[in-house]
Image: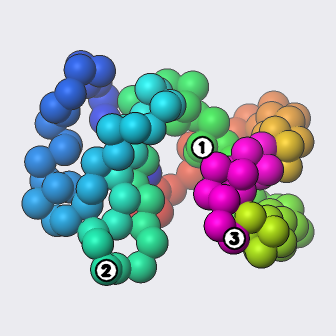
């Protein structure tokens, strides 16, 4: 995840050109306006780059989910298994796959929120 302290939601943004120079493709059709979304360069393995505003709910949600899975290996395994199952079921329906993950993600984020309150969660180290 790339974290940007502040940016104008109007396009272009300061991070777009460097990502595009690396071959990443900006997905203007992404309906989620709380992040900017880039896909892998053509012909390379699937890679998603989500750019989120620093301190936004969108950023905090993703980081809490990540950190909860890091601290709860059984939940991480369950998420991986669910993604594999849904990938088989929705092999040719990308939007169906994404929508089908939502119930699992929301159940997990509720558990993560309770965990975060119990341990005084703070953002863990970056994956970068």
Q: Main secondary structure of the magenta part?
A: helix
**Camera-nearest label, 1 or 2:** 2
Residue drawn 62% across and 57% down?
94
Distance of mark 1 from mark 2, alpha carbons?
27 Å
| Category of crowding for the residue at label 3, using alpha-carbon neighbours closer than 10 angstroms: few (below 14), some (14–19), many (at least 20) | few
Which sits earlier in the primary sequence, circle 3 or circle 1?
A: 1
Quarter-of-image position of residue 54: top left
Camera-side residue: 11 or 59? Answer: 11
Relative vertical location of residue 93 with respect to residue 123 in this rendering, above or below: below
Quarter in which the C terminus is drawn? bottom left
* Pointer 1 residue: 62
Residue numbers of the magenta segment: 91-102
Q: Is residue 49 left or right of residue 82?
A: left
Residue drawn 19% across and 43% down?
15
Q: Position of residue 99 (x, y in %)?
A: 73, 45
| Category of crowding for the residue at label 1, using alpha-carbon neighbours closer than 10 angstroms: few (below 14), some (14–19), many (at least 20) | some
Residue drawn 20% across and 27% down?
11
Quarter-of-image position of residue 97: bottom right
Q: Which mark is residue 91?
A: 3
* Pointer 2 residue: 43
Which sits earlier in the primary sequence, circle 3 or circle 2?
A: 2
User: Is residue 88 magenta-colored?
Assistant: no
Can the viewer see residue 10? yes
Q: Classify mark 3: helix, strand or loop.
A: loop
Distance of mark 3 from mark 2, alpha carbons?
19 Å
Q: Classify mark 2: helix, strand or loop.
A: loop
Q: Are marks 1 and 2 in contact (CB under 8 Å)?
A: no
User: Is residue 93 magenta-colored?
Assistant: yes
């Amino acid at each position: 995840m790339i974290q940007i302290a502040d940016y104008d939601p109007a396009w272009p943004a300061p991070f777009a050109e460097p990502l595009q120079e690396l071959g990443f493709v900006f997905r203007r059709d992404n309906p989620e306006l709380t992040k900017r979304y880039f896909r892998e360069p053509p012909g390379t393995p699937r890679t998603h780059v989500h750019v989120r505003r620093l301190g936004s709910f969108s950023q905090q949600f993703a980081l809490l989910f990540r950190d909860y899975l890091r601290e709860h290996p059984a939940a991480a395994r369950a998420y991986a298994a669910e993604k594999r199952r849904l990938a088989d079921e929705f092999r040719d329906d990308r939007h169906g796959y994404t929508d089908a993950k939502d119930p699992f993600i929301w159940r997990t984020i509720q558990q993560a929120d309770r965990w975060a309150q119990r341990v005084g969660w703070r953002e863990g180290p970056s994956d970068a």
